[in-house]
Amino acid sequence: MNANFPKSDFPVLFSDRFKLVEIKDEHRNDIFELFGDDSVTQFYNITTLQRVEDADAIIDHFRTRFADKKGIRWGIAEPTNEAKILGTIGFNSIIPEHKAQLGYDLKSAQWKRGIITEVIDCVLNYAFNNLNINRVEAEVMPGNYASERVLEKNGFLKEGLFRDWMFWNNRHYDMYIYSVLKSDRKK
Ligand SMILES: CC(C)(COP(=O)(O)OP(=O)(O)OC[C@H]1O[C@@H](n2cnc3c(N)ncnc32)[C@H](O)[C@@H]1OP(=O)(O)O)[C@@H](O)C(=O)NCCC(=O)NCCS
């Protein structure tokens, strides 16, 4: 039982420039633009979307994870236009009182504007203060320098390379594991 998980309402968060919102059907075209781009999916265990309808399964997945209290994925929007999202961020899995796994992605036109660095801070505060999570971890495929830089810049420790950690499309992949603890953030 996850006593700290929101009861029903999706938690809307704010950073200086962005509003983190629930991902809904109205974001279908944005989700397609995001996950239909090979440069976004190249380090993921998903196939680049080919048709806009394929976005529906992703939106459903995020909705179900939240309803089951197993994950939270926010859409990153400008506060004046939450019908359009620029990317997503959130926790793919949440183990109550213990740990959560972070993931994020942005439309390629939005890269290098400091967006993920800004919203990571916001979702980490939420995990540590509202969900009472102790450890947030992230998995990064070797070669994904942008993601490594984001994590290092935001106080994550690179714990090591886990060999053959991911299995996808009949292949094993090594993954770097990064983490940040609640106590790290207080230092
Ligand atoms: C990883 C990703 C989310 C980065 O988001 P972003 O908003 O562009 O990152 P930021 O602007 O906050 O940048 C943080 C740091 O990373 C650096 N960085 C960002 N993209 C980079 C790139 N392509 N190559 C090298 N460094 C990069 C920035 O320069 C910055 O460091 P600096 O302040 O020293 O200059 C984005 O590249 C992306 O969506 N990639 C595809 C999806 C993905 O791989 N997600 C992560 C899976 S683990």
Image: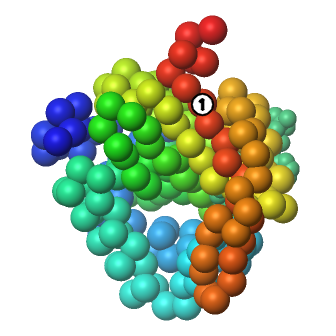
Measuring from the top left, give residue 42's x and y in whole percent. 71, 73
Any part of residue 119 in sight: no
Rendered-image quadrant of the C terminus: top right
Measuring from the top left, give residue 167's x and y in whole percent. 61, 76
- Give the residue drawn at x 35%, y 79%: 56
Q: In front: 7, or 49? A: 7
Is 178 on the left or on the right of 88, as rendered? right
Is 103 on the left or on the right of 72, as rendered? right
Q: In front: 11, or 111? A: 11
Give above or below for 5 relative to 103.
above
Q: In front: 141, or 21? A: 141
Q: Element under label 1?
A: strand
Location of mark 1 (residue): 180
Is 169 on the left or on the right of 20, as rendered? right
- Displayed quadrant of residue 142: bottom right
Measuring from the top left, give residue 136's x and y in whole percent. 52, 37
Tally of marks: 1
